[in-house]
Amino acid sequence: MLPSTSLAPTLTAAASFFIIALLILLLRRFFTSPLNGIPGPWWARLSDLPLFYKSAVCLQQAQTVEELHRKYGSIVRIAPNEVAVSSLASFKVVNKIGGGFVKSPWYEYIGPTEKNYPPAGLFQQNDPHKHAMTRKLFARGFTAAYLRAEWEDMVRNKTAKAVEGIAQDARDARGVCDVRRWLTFLASDVISELMFGESLGGLETQKMHAFFHEVRSSNLASLLSYHLPLVYSALSWIPLSALTDFFNAWKSLLDISSIAYRNSLSNASNKNIFSGILAKAEEDDEALTPMQVTVEAGSFIIAGSETTSESLTYLIWAVLKRPEVQNELQQELAKIDSGASDAELEKLPVLNAVIKETLRLYAAIPMPEPRVVPKGGVTLERQFLPEGTVVNTTPWVSHRDSAIFPDPEKFDFRRWLPDGSATLSPDARTAWWPFGAGSRTCIGQHLAMMEMRLATVLFFKRFAGAKLASDTTDDSMIMNNYVVISPKSGKMKVDFSNVSGL
């Protein structure tokens, strides 16, 4: 008992010191920060935890930032060293190519990695030079022309399989099917086939591969370490197998993703997108290590699965909710063959306008995108931001700017039609950025658009007469959002009972 008693004063002193130091830090933040003149909620002076709570627990990340802009204006403080801006003028400054605003450290915590290990992939990199070099290596493999030549048939075949799966489910369940489930299988199988040379088998097994469960655990653990490092450290010391698995999920992602490098060297039919990229890199004396390929493959699968499936889910919901839009789309699609190429589909005005309007209102990743103010600082919205300040621009907010998009909450695909362009402001195409902006635009956007065109065409040509199921309501489709969107109910059921020849 004596050692415990003798330790008590020491532990008390240590705890007191910690509490006093924390209070001094918080008081310093509250009273002396150069950002104190920027409007925002009182808690933003002290911590980002209230915003983290609204994002990760309430699942209202982008919506919360929009509410703060409505209350406080075009620039709002959202954390001790972080602001969000909403005007197009500020957006252009922050996302200007070569403007010096690099990705914040937040991105280092997303993907099949742990901070500082292994090497950051294209998505995580915040060094502009390294990012430019990496992007150059991958650019050829993600052009629209290359994807159409090498991978369009694969995307079409998997889309057809998903459509048939939907039909079979509907036949088995008296005409009703959860379409979102099949779109998730489709997107995950397409991107895994592209990255690994073999799909993760969702369309065949009708189950999500363990990889995607590890993704959720890995991202949650990483974001916990970013926002609550002390909690992360404390939990990581607890010897429970469930917690050990949770904190090691990123290692499991790397193990699974290593398939990408092995198959990229294969002479068999299971080559992947890295096969050509590695060959071209070798020609140009630019090497990609096995670990780089592994990290990139895992990152691309994370980025290209839920995003595409959720956008397609909301597209089908938005169209079926509006019979007049459904009729006009199906009239256009009736004029083409089901086997029309993606290049031909890209020319269809109604189809592509519907996709663009879906991505405006239901961008898969509408969250605030943090960048770091470069050396010398910057003035935005008449407020000076010192270097090192994190500044966010938010697709959700840009896409709902009434000065740019009239009646912004209305799903109006006509605003994107060639003969309807007068309804858009001159800056509308700049303000539409569901795939990111500047030098950090999504390298996979051509693949995503191909998937969306093919899936939309095959779905609506096959299921003329489909309608929303009675329990698919506005409430069930309320968007949850923490990084990626998803419907509150987790489902999007469609009634196919009026579809002939099901």
Image (cartoon, rainbow, N blue to C red):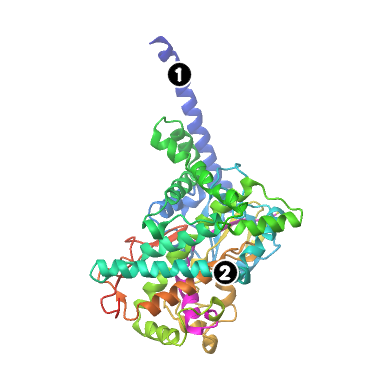
Q: Which mark is residue 446?
A: 2
- The amino acid type of the residue labelled 2 equals His
Name the residue nearer the viewer: 393 or 346: 346
Q: Which residues are magenta?
A: 345-374
Seen as rendered, the residue at the extreme left is 174
| Residues at marks 2 and 1, CA–CA distance in whole angstroms | 64 Å
Residue shown at the point (70%, 53%) measured from the top left: 130
Q: Position of residue 210 (x, y in %)?
A: 42, 48
- The amino acid type of the residue labelled 1 equals Pro
Q: Quadrant of the C terminus?
A: bottom left
Seen as rendered, the residue at the extreme bottom is 419
Name the residue nearer the viewer: 242 or 141: 141
Does the rendering let one see residue 408?
yes
Q: Nearer the viewer, mark 2 or mark 1?
A: 2
Q: Badge 1: few (under 14), some or many (20 or more) residues near its Cα, within 10 Å? A: few
Name the residue nearer the viewer: 432 or 266: 266
Reading the image, the residue beneath label 1 is 9
Closer to the N terminus: mark 2 or mark 1? 1
Does the rendering let one see residue 398?
no
